[in-house]
Image: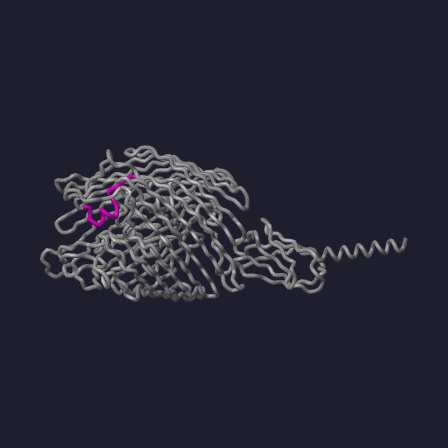
Amino acid sequence: MKNIFLSLAVCCIALGVNAQNSLEAVIYNNEEKTPLLGANAIVKGTDIGTTTDIDGKIRLENIPDGNQIIEFSFLGFESEEIELQFPRASSEVLQIYLEPSGEEMEEVLIRSTRSRRTIADLPTRVEVISGEELAEKGNMKPGDIRMLLNETTGIQTQQTSATSYNSSIRIQGLDGKYTQLLKDGYPLYSGFSGGLSLLQIVPLDLQQVEVIKGSSSTLYGGGAIAGLVNLISKTPGEERELNFMLNGTSALGLDLSGFYSEDYGKLGTTVFASYNMGSPYDPADNGLTAIPEFNRFTLNPRIFYDFTENTKMDVGINATLEERTGGDIDWLNGESVTDPYFERNKTKRYTLQAGLEHNWSDNKRLNFKHSLSFFDRSLETGDFKFAGNQLASYNEVSINMGKMTSEWIAGVNLWVDRFDQDQLYDRPVVDYEHYTYGLFLQNNWTASDFFQLETGLRTDYQNEYGWFVLPRISAMFNISDAITSRVGGGLGYKAPSVFTEDAERLQFRNVLPIDVSSIEAENSLGGNFDINYRTELFDLINFTSNTLFFYTKIDNPIILQPTGGMFEYVQPKGYVESKGLEANLKLGYRDFKLFTGYTFADVTRTENGVETLMPLVSKHRLNNVLMYELEESLKIGLEGYYFSEQQLSDGAIGQSYWIFGLMMEKLWEDFSIFLNFENFTDTRQTRFDSIFTGSVSNPEFRDIYAPVDGFVVNGGFKLFL
């Protein structure tokens, strides 16, 4: 009996010792204080290891006796090691808090999808420009957003006027009319008002820029065939924000901007104001401006009010006034010139935005949105003048409901767009009045940790072009902690408009109104597939890659062609196809970051069975940025961008070229100084090709496919009060 009790005692001691040779822990994100799914724990020098579950918990078993080092790690976070003696004296569950490293993938909430999900949880592929990247691009071109978009893989800002600098956004090689530009989800820059939009939007008050490539018609209707760009404004935060920026350029330009934001409890406000001016600049000495003379004032106050914890409202007004004149440089400098060529744009833009949000619970949210926009523009060149005003209104009611596993978004909207041209000549005006009624439904379904699905359906009725039914589907696969993939596609349409890149190049001279009886809406089918990979190389280098394959087909596109001394929109039988890929690589090593992007875009137009290349598309593009950054102290960036040969409208082939830039910023707590050497190799179309034929007083402009302003230095300072 004594031996039996002794044996039982030995077993109990052994079991107790074995129980203490296990370890339980919960691993958290130290900033968010939230558990990390998929974090790693390993006993160094052994093959004992595991990963956390959805609650951040791990359990390690059969740990050898003695001092052992346990390493806790998660991609994008600093690893932590602790030393423990086994058997342990206690079975206490450890709480491990990992600090995000400099390469942590931000938890960004996407506004364009109207979901409560973050960018990492969305089946729809969304690209976001925010934070430091947005600030860096703002330093390089503080007066407008052209550079911010042009240096994004798959996007090209196409200059449509040699002298006024006017530009449009092209996504994956498709014309700018197929890209929808939004401000906080409102379609404020369509039709006539889209003509100078890229030049009149200042980036200082932007929180982030969201880009969705491919058909995005479920939530936003027609016009988003190539994709959409949504400019998200800053809102009041927990702390007051007061920023000022002063920037000057070697081309005698000046940008002065200020932004104020504060939350007073139930009441909050943001105020943005800017003054931007440019002097006439002709680096090619060919007699015509590469940068026009302009003066622009912008004021954008917004008020945010919380009626209750669940009911919130915001109201904002945006006013922009600008006069922009390009052309004969001598005439602009005050010299006496006989019959000078010039292009003068005078614009007034006023917008009222209002939004109301009511939350019944965590799972139900009602949103109301309203905008009213007035845009007045006159375009004068020589003895010709085109002028008119546009009144546009957007109204929407939507509801979000369901849980994160199955979220529903439904809504209705009414979009009114009216243009009235001033009757200055004895010829037809291009007036129109469009009403679009929309009904949409979208579901985001998380089937499992591996698979998520987004489905949507929209029905639009357009008063001149009838009914459109637009289905859309996207799926995301979480293949592993390091690999995710998305696939999606949908239908789209574009209601014809006279305000296209081709008409803008003509300053709308002799452009006839669209014959609704013979022209149909353009319809599209598009799809894309991408795969993302994220890892650490050699435990030293953070590596991220993304490869996107895309395809879009647009049936019966309208084109502008000369007819008896006039220009008429026609719709020949045919289609436009855009297919290709985008590849992005990002490497981070200590204080260095390298971004490389490659775009292959094969865009063709087929008319009556004959296929031709789409003009002004770089089939091959490279975006390269090398950054050195000491956190909150110093930033130095070197950029290199390559554009391959482009087919031009006159049948010629444009030359390939590189653009290089260097930017620097020194930061203190409340102050920073920046200096930017843009295009320091002075790449200009006027150095290797002509931009016009004929005389300076009567120029015939060719396609602009390369920079015309050349090497420009800009610099200034920012205050953070």
Instruction: Return the residue found at the far right.
Output: 1
> Which quarter shows the C terminus?
bottom left
Residue placed most toward the observer, 272 or 394: 394
Camera-side residue of 422 and 338: 338
In the image, 79: left or right of 509? right
Residue 361: tell me if it is visible.
Answer: no
Asked whether, in this view, residue 77 is left or right of residue 287, the answer is right
Left or right: 458 in relation to 288: right
The residue lying at 15 percent from left, 61 percent from top is 330
Colouring style:
one colour
Count of numbered badges drawn on the protein: 0
Q: Position of residue 642 (x, y in %)?
A: 34, 60
Displayed quadrant of residue 178: top left
Q: Residue furthest front?
A: 609
Relative horizontal placement of residue 498, taking residue 28 as reference (left or right): left
Please identify the residue farthest to the left as the structure is shown.
Answer: 338
Most common secondary structure along the magenta stretch = loop
* Any part of residue 635 in sight: yes
Q: Is residue 314 above or below residue 596?
A: above
The verdict on residue 501 being magenta is: yes
User: In the rendering, at what x and y percent does residue 317 appear?
Assistant: 31, 46
**Residue 60 belongs to magenta span:** no
Q: Quadrant of residue 400?
A: top left
Closer-to-camera residue (570/104): 570
Q: Nearer the viewer, residue 318 or 182?
A: 182
- x and y, in percent, of residue 80 in the image: 58, 61
**Residue 441 image point, x, y percent:** 43, 36
Residue span colored magenta: 494-508
